[in-house]
Amino acid sequence: VTGREHKSGKTVLRLENEMKQIAVIPARSGSKGLKDKNIKVLNGKPMMAYTIEAALNSKLFDCVHVSTDSAQYASIAKQYGADVPFLRDKELADSKASTWDALRDVIQKYKEAGREFDAVTLLQPTSPLRSAADIREAHCIFQEKNADSVVSVCQMEHPIQICNTLGENGSLYQFLDSNRIGARQDQAVYYRINGAIYILKLWMLLEKENIYNKNSYAYIMSKAHSVDIDDYLDFKLAEILAKENF
């Protein structure tokens, strides 16, 4: 909002031009890999609470909305300060439903209620170690570059040169290309989408399926903050790291 400053290390973000921003946290019920993972208690708090608190503490948003199909999830989200004036429609809560379609529905429903936004930030609750500082720093890039989108990434855990698909019957024939394998320090650095932060100008959400264009930029996050919880092993790793970081 006009005149407000956000400090993250040496970076200062000043939003000179008023831009209405909404953070949307998608938290449907019924996850299969880890039952009810979005509200599973992580070191004393439901997992989604970490993302709600990070969004609120960033002080960037006019609205922090949790998109859920569950009245139970909505009640928990409200306890931690999120806005949940409506539940997600059932057809948008299926495991095959698109998160982007759910976001478009959120924007439309707020518009019908008289609230409109210029940009939307998607914050997945399965990335509980992403901090308010991470969100602010990603928004610094969004503002400074006048980007259409900013997406968080982290460095790949293993060199891409030692990765490949397996052949028929598990064959390793031509699995590695000896010409591509050299000293580790000489190999190019590869990054992966970590799923923690997606910032989009509203027109891009409404009109585009591909959010990666010439005016899209990366926000590089640490590996420690990039844990994306999909199964029990991910959850246990997040527990250990959360005790050190929070």
Image: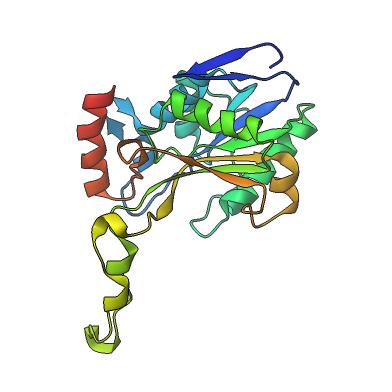
Looking at the image, is 203 positioned above or below residue 240? below
- Rendered residue at 43%/37% (across/down): 125
Q: Quadrant of the C terminus?
A: top left
The x, y position of residue 155, in whole percent, is: 36, 48
Residue 166 in view, yes or no: yes
- Rendered residue at 53%/39% (across/down): 68
The x, y position of residue 24, in whole percent, is: 57, 35
Q: Quadrant of the N terminus?
A: top right
- Rendered residue at 62%/24% (across/down): 63
Image-based side of 130 in relation to 172, left or right: right
The x, y position of residue 93, in whole percent, is: 54, 50
Q: Quadrant of residue 200?
A: top right
Colour scheme: rainbow
The x, y position of residue 202, in whole percent, is: 72, 40
Q: Nearer the viewer, residue 18 or 177?
A: 177
Residue 76 in view, yes or no: no
Looking at the image, is 66 positioned above or below residue 167? above
- Rendered residue at 24%/48% (across/down): 232
Q: Nearer the viewer, residue 152 or 57?
A: 152
Image-based side of 36 in relation to 26, left or right: left
Q: Nearer the viewer, residue 167 or 44?
A: 167
